[in-house]
Image: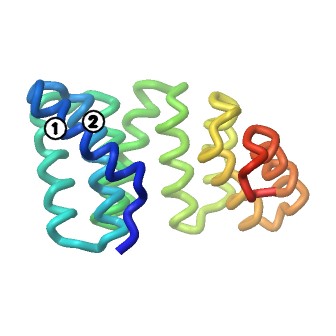
Amino acid sequence: TFIPDNDKTAVGYYCKAVAHDPHFALAWARLTKVLADVARYSGSDADAAQAKSALDHALSLAPDSPDVRMAQGWYLDYVKKDLDGAMAAFSAVARSQPNNAQALFGGGVMLGHKGQWQDALGFLQRAVALAPQDKMFLDELVVAFEALRRYPEAIMTARRIVAIDPDDGAG
């Protein structure tokens, strides 16, 4: 099973952080997201259970935290495949923080997963407007443009990615 090295490294650091301070809600939230990503790649029930445990800790510490709600959204997407639940989590963050690029990105990804590409495009464009150098946001924007058969815009966006990181193969 392929697990990205940066996920393995992040898990180690976040585990150390929460061991040092078990009340560190942000670390629990970030651990949740990375463990959910690990579970997505591995398909392992044990990895999914670890992600759920981290989420439960984060929710017990700070249930209304935007960071915890974002982690919950990614957990629901990556582990539970609950697109509506994930969208609800991202939307809650976006309502309380309308300029939260991560929440807009999450909403755009969920809408894309549901095939609602025109709506996804709006979310993704707003996220990119707030974080114009974020390659992950730009990558997903390329996907949306391609899904909508807006190829010239997809190519222009891919070129933006290459301008940010010439070693990226997107262009």
Q: Nearer the viewer, residue 74 or 35?
A: 35
Q: Dot 2, crowdedness within 10 Å: few (<14), some or many (≥20)?
A: many
Q: Using the image, determine if residue 87 lies above or below residue 146.
A: above
Q: Using the image, determine if residue 45 lies above or below residue 85.
A: below
Q: Are marks 2 and 1 in contact (CB under 8 Å)?
A: yes
Q: Position of residue 170 (x, y in %)?
A: 75, 57
Residue 118 appears anywhere in the view:
yes
Q: Position of residue 49 (x, y in %)?
A: 14, 61
Looking at this view, name the residue that lies furthest to the right: 152
Q: Earlier in the sequence, mark 2 or mark 1?
A: 1
Give me the residue at 21% from left, 36% from top.
28
In the displayed structure image, the side of residue 48 where residue 93 appears, left or right: right
Q: Dot 1, crowdedness within 10 Å: few (<14), some or many (≥20)?
A: some
The numbered dot on residue 68 is 2
Give me the residue at 72% from left, 67% from top.
147
Q: Secondary structure at mark 2?
A: helix
The quadrant in which the C terminus is found is bottom right
Label 1 amino acid? Answer: Leu
Give me the residue at 18% from left, 35% from top.
16
Q: Nearer the viewer, residue 4 or 71?
A: 4
